[in-house]
Each structure stands twice: as C-alpha cells, then as structure tokens.
Amino acid sequence: MAPVKEMESKQPKSMEKRTLQVSNPHLEQMKDDILYHFDLGTNTHDFQDLFGDVKFVCVGGSPSRMKAFAQYITGELNMGDPTADIPNICAGTDRYAMYKVGPVLSISHGMGIPSISIMLHELIKLLYHSKCCDVTIIRIGTSGGIGIEPGSVVITSQSVNPCFEPQFEQIVLGKTVIRSTKLDAELAQELVQCSQEINEFNTVIGNTMCTLDFYEGQARLDGAICSYTEEEKMQYLRAAYEAGIRNIEMESSVFAAMCNISGLRAAVVCVTLLNRLEGDQISSSHDVLVEYQQRPQKLVGYFIKKHLTKV
Ligand code: URA
C-alpha cells in the first residue's frame, strides 16, 4: 500500500492569535475526557482554571530534570524560592511528571517516540480543554553530536528520519501516513539570538536525526546486537554530517509532526553529550554531564524570561 502524505497545518501570520487545533472530530462528543497517563480528567479537574494561563511548555525525557527546570524557572522569574520543593501535578501516576510555574509547564516525556507521542496526545488535549492560545512548546534534551564538540547545544532546523528525510511515518489503520517534521524557523532563530546573548557555550543550528533506538538505530558498535563494521558506521555518520545533521536523538520527529498538526509553535534544543565521530560511549564525568544538561535549560529559561519581561 502506498504511503499517504498528510497536508501541513496552515500557520497563522506572526501577529495573528494562535489557537490550538485538535485534529479529532470525536473529541467534541465526549462528555468526559480522561487523560489517563496524567491522572487528570475534564470531569474531575477544572482545566481552564488550572492551565488556562499556560504560554510556555517545556518537555524533556527525565522527571528529575523537568523538576529541576521548574525550580530553575521559579528563580529566573522571581516566583519563589528555587530550592523549595514543587508539587508534581501528575503525582497520581508514575508515567509522567508535570510541574507548573506561572505560565510555564514543565513535563517529562520518557524515552523514545512511543513515550513522547502518548504524552503529547494528552498534553495537546489538556491545552485544548484549557482554551490556551499562543503557546510555545520546546523540547529540551540530550543527544549525540556529529562533528561538533561535546557540550555544544543544537537548535534543530529540521528533524529528519534515519534516511535523512524530513518526515515522520505513522501507521494508522494499517496504512502508512507521512507527516511533515517542519519546526518554527522564526522561533529557532530567536533561540540562536538568545544563545548569542548568553554567550556561555557553543550553539549551532542544524538538522537533528531522530531514531528508534540508542544502539543500532544510531550506528553504535557497543550494543548487544551489531551487524555492521566500523567502516560502515563511519560512512553512515559522515553521510549524516554531509546532510546537515549535527545531532541524533529519539523524540524530535514525532514531536515536530504532532506540534505541526496542532498549530503549536515548536522548537527542539538539545545538548550533545559526545561527538559520535570519535566514539560511542558516554564517558564524561557525572559533574560534566550534569553541567551539559543545564545548558538547554539555561537557554530556554533565558528565552522565556525575555518574553515574559518584554510586555
Ligand atoms: N541521546 C541519544 O539519543 N543519543 C546519544 O548519543 C546521547 C543521548
């Protein structure tokens, strides 16, 4: 069966209000919507009251990192003591963790496409039920770099699949549907500008390859299964570099596709933990890795602060 290419959502001109689109006619008929993996529901929670003011959503793999980001943003926005504990809105489940600091939501999404996809379905419905508008969503994460120094931050211009194509394939009712992985170019440029203003770490804009796993999918030689030679691995990674790819991770394609369909202004900002042209194992010390992981948080924190203090 030939794959079906889905239309891209129409983006508003920059001054227009961005309302969220849920691309599902069945939702209107539902009397109650249970967001099972968040342990939230429209009959048990007043979404508009809880989340109606949300303007920025930051998502990242690990629950502890997203809690740390919420605490960091508390300090940056002068909204309280950044060392104080902060309640997890999704405390009734251990699937995802969610924190709210004023208009900023910080949510964990776990590892890989299936995990972030489930979280995004429920997050997009949460924003829709809350009648949020003009929401910016940014994935902050870690990645493997290609041809750039470890610790560099990559702002994704395009998310591409392991064949270097800017698309995400979703199987729906047994048919392959192809979705665009286009991200917001203006937002990416704004983030580059913020990074120049901070001027603390190397930042590049480039393509990000999204894979289905960490080992074979990312051409590693150190997994439990490997059917290629070192030379073949290097050939593939060099070809990726030639295609403008500067980092590899496991969530950006479905993130870009789902945000695109829903009319969300979206960006991906990931730090690189190693240079994959030089090895496969992440061998930097714990302290170095902790500092690296703070870089996307610093950049996005600066961006949010700049926006919220502008008006
Ligand atoms: N995350 C990935 O997906 N790959 C890496 O190499 C490092 C972090």
Image (tube, rainbow, N blue to C red):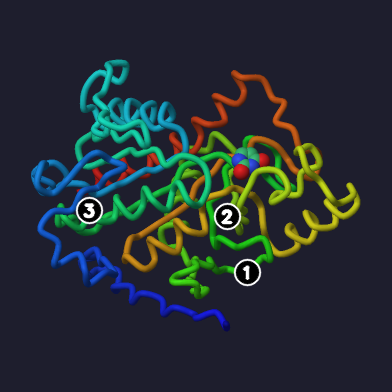
Type of the residue with mark 1 = Glu
The secondary element bearing badge 1 is classed as loop
Relative to the observer, which residue lies in front, 175 or 127? 175
Mark before the other along the chain sequence, 3 or 1:
3
Figure disc tally: 3
The reply to whether callout 1 and callout 2 are in contact (CB within 8 Å) is no
Residue 107's quadrant in the figure?
A: top left
Q: What residue is shown with label 2? A: 205
Task: Say which residue appears at 69% left-offset and 51% top-offset.
Answer: 217
The three-letter amino acid code for the residue at tag 2 is: Ile
Label ID, residue 127: 3
Q: Residue at x 29, y 50 (%)?
A: 123
Residue 272 appears in the picture as rendered: no
Is residue 72 shown left or right of residue 55?
right
Give the alpha-carbon distance from disc 1 to disc 2, as whole Å. Answer: 17 Å
Q: Nearer the viewer, mark 3 or mark 2?
A: 3
Amino acid on which the number 3 mark rests in the picture: Leu
- Locate residue 305, reporting x and y percent: 31, 40
Q: Is residue 112 above or below residue 124?
A: above
Residue plotted at (59% across, 48% down): 249
Give the image location of residue 117, x and y in percent: 42, 53
- Compared with residue 24, is residue 135 higher up or lower down, i.e. above or below? above
| Residue topped by disc 1 | 165
Label 3, label 2: how far apart the Cα atoms are:
29 Å
- Image-quarter location of ligand 1: top right
